[in-house]
Amino acid sequence: MPTDDLPETFHVTTDEQLRAVSSLTRHRIMAVLRFEPATITQIAERVGLAKGSSSYHVRLLERAGLVKVVRTRKVRGVTERYYAMAARAIVLPDPGEGGPDVLMRHAVADLEASPVGGERHVRMAHLRLTEEQFAQLGARLQALADEYRELSDPSLPDASLVFALFHPAPREQAEGDAK
């Protein structure tokens, strides 16, 4: 199934959907399906899971509406299902004050699991911006991510881009939380 046929976004709105995307294993399965459909066997091999575990996690994602069967074929009397993402992008709800940001937790876990000695570009910058500059930077980062997503070639190795632009908690609040 070409990714051109996919809706642009899928908004996570239910508890079932939030639980489905909160799992690092399911996050990694969705990464496998981001560019092309795959079978349970292919997913298991790419993620490093047993087929049974892979099947369990894919079923949860399918039940939550995050992935769907896009093609089937018969192989030695067994129906093989190809799964794909339900949309190009998954939009998570705002975690709310003090809530864990699922996306950032998964990004850090993926970064920590990346090959030692592999090329990585990680940077943190503290900025002082007007609200207009803050909004402009957020829009530029989103546009850059969208531009490179359009250039993505499924035959090339995966690369992850994560960014977070936010106003940190006031110092008094952050210091009080540390006590």
Image: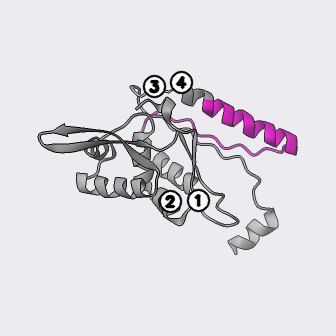
**Distance between the Cα atoms at labels 3 and 1?**
30 Å
Q: Position of residue 124 (x, y in %)?
A: 66, 44
Of the image marks 2 and 3, the number of the one nearer the N terminus:
2
Callout 4 crowding tier (Cα within 10 Å): few <14, some 14–19, many ≥20: few
Between disc 2 and disc 4, the foreground one is 2
Q: Which residue in the protein does label 4 denote?
A: 151
**Is residue 138 on the magenta stretch?**
yes
* 154 lies above or below 22: above
Q: Nearer the viewer, mark 2 or mark 3?
A: 2
- Label 4 sits on what residue type? Leu
- Return the mark for residue 17: 2
Residue 39 vs residue 177: left or right? Answer: left
Task: State how far apart marks 3 and 4 are (Cα).
Answer: 6 Å
Q: Upstream in the sequence, badge 3 or badge 1?
A: 1
Residue 135 appears left or right of 118: right
- Which residue appears farthest toward the left when viewing the image? 76
Label 3 with label 4: CB-CB less than 8 Å: yes
Percent across and percent down for residue 160 are 51, 38
Amino acid type of disc 1?
Answer: Thr
Gap in Å between the C-alphas at discs 2 and 3? 28 Å
Which is more toward the observer, 59 or 35? 59
Q: Label 3, on which residue?
A: 153
Task: Identify the amino acid type marked 2.
Answer: Gln
Q: Is residue 95 magenta?
A: no
| First in sequence: mark 4 vs mark 1 | 1
| Amino acid beneath label 3 | Asp
Depth order, front residue of 116/63 = 63
